[in-house]
Amino acid sequence: MIKKESKLLVVDDNIDYVNFIRRALDAEDYKLSIALDGNTAIEKAAKENPDLVLLDLKLPDLDGEEVLGRMKQDNKDITVVVITGYGDDQVAMDMMKKGAIDFLTKPIEPQILIKAIKNALEIREAQQEDKQLELYPSLDRFFPFFAHEIRNPLHAISGALTIIQRRSNLGDEVLAQSINIINEEIQHLNEFVQECLNFVRPPNKVRFVEVDINEVIHVVINIITHIFERESNTVRVVTEMDPSLPKIYSNYEEIKQAFLNIVKNAYEAMPKGGELMIRTIQKSDPPNYIQIIFADTGVGVKKEAIPSLFDPFFTTKPLGTGLGLAVCRRIIAERNNGKILIESEEGKGTTVIVKLPFDHPSEESPEKSDGI
Ligand SMILES: Nc1ncnc2c1ncn2[C@@H]1O[C@H](COP(=O)(O)OP(=O)(O)O)[C@@H](O)[C@H]1O
Ligand SMILES: [Mg+2]
């Protein structure tokens, strides 16, 4: 995905420091705008709508707190990282309470500056995504609300933890381990919230394009081997792709998400290793469809659990969300007029069969199609 260049507003009356920041960010892809006093900063923030403001607290005309307050008044979603002098920690904490996302104390190492900027921009992006989703009216509104309520404190926890990490003696093993635990739990919660959002993400037919399913499968395998790389997992993936598989008309990202969920489940079902076989086949007995088979040699599913597999929140894993297959069904059946079936035997393995039509699905009325 091509990312647009982020706009940064640097607010500092010390031209030497502005130049230092300019040099530190030279190799990064940011567009910088400079304000040497508070009033100019407020004006520029309103006019230029920067993605991030680096705000020095000591300015000739206004104090930093007022500048932050007025910027937030104009645009409550503005992302501000505060820069303080040595010994201003209390003020910095007050600024965090007033909505700054992070603070840095001078002198700042260029690497720390770059990391803080990246971190703040990522948080901003996630917040904007939550906001967009809030606009969709439906019963599913609960999830975006819920995501917002969880993500905001999570971002604050994550930000505060970065500060603790930066200032702690990580040679202390217990401390380092505790920080790791908090980080892992934050990540877990973030993933959970993300899955909830995937579940309600509205269909976007505008993004329907020709999709090469064989290619999606290759991408998914790459992603998954990367995710499971650390666990020295011994899962062997074997593919048997039909080279003349017709392209389907679909949303690439959604199909990728669905396959990723299926393959992730297969990996999770084989903690001691095993084999995952992925096959693609074209079926030409009308109606035309392609079939994708994911067969693993994992733990399998208990007979009584099979009818519940696609229910939201049904999980047999201690840290599972139970949303992976619910998302798959939404994407494959509801949004692509396809089918997803699971056959499984406890202790032997599981086979997931996906069927997708390769004629363009009718835009407005899925009921009209013959189905498969
Ligand atoms: N390949 C598989 N092998 C064994 N069990 C599976 C497999 N795929 C799904 N399941 C079962 O279906 C449940 C629901 O899956 P999913 O919706 O992805 O949620 P989660 O992975 O978070 O538990 C899993 O907890 C598991 O019991
Ligand atoms: Mg899953």
Image: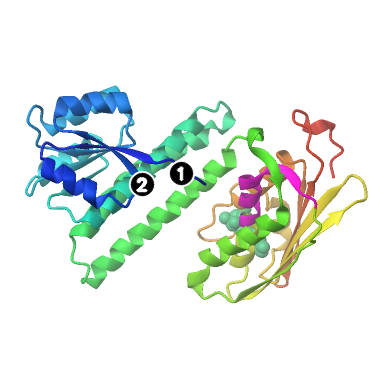
Q: Is mark 1 within 8 Å of ligand 2?
A: no
Residue 165 in the figure: left or right of residue 140: left
Quarter of the view holding residue 332: top right
Name the disc covering residue 126, or none. Answer: none
Quarter of the view holding residue 331: top right
Q: Is residue 27 above or below residue 143?
A: below
Q: Which residues are magenta?
A: 246-260
Q: Are marks 2 and 1 in contact (CB under 8 Å)?
A: yes
Under mark 1, the amino acid is Lys
Q: Is residue 139 above or below residue 311?
A: above
Q: Is residue 197 magenta?
A: no
Q: Position of residue 280 (x, y in %)?
A: 78, 60
Quarter of the view holding residue 369: top right
For this rendering, which residue is in front, 280 or 142?
A: 280
Q: Secondary structure at mark 2?
A: loop
Name the disc covering residue 3, or none. Answer: 1
Picture residue at 22% right of the left edge, 67% below the top: 170
Q: Position of residue 48 (x, y in %)?
A: 31, 28
Picture residue at 78% right of the left edge, 29% below the top: 365
**Does residue 24 appear in this view?**
yes
Name the disc covering residue 29, or none. Answer: 2
Under mark 2, the amino acid is Asp
- Mark 1 surroundings within 10 Å by alpha-carbon count, few (fewer than 14), some (14 through 19), many (20 or more): few
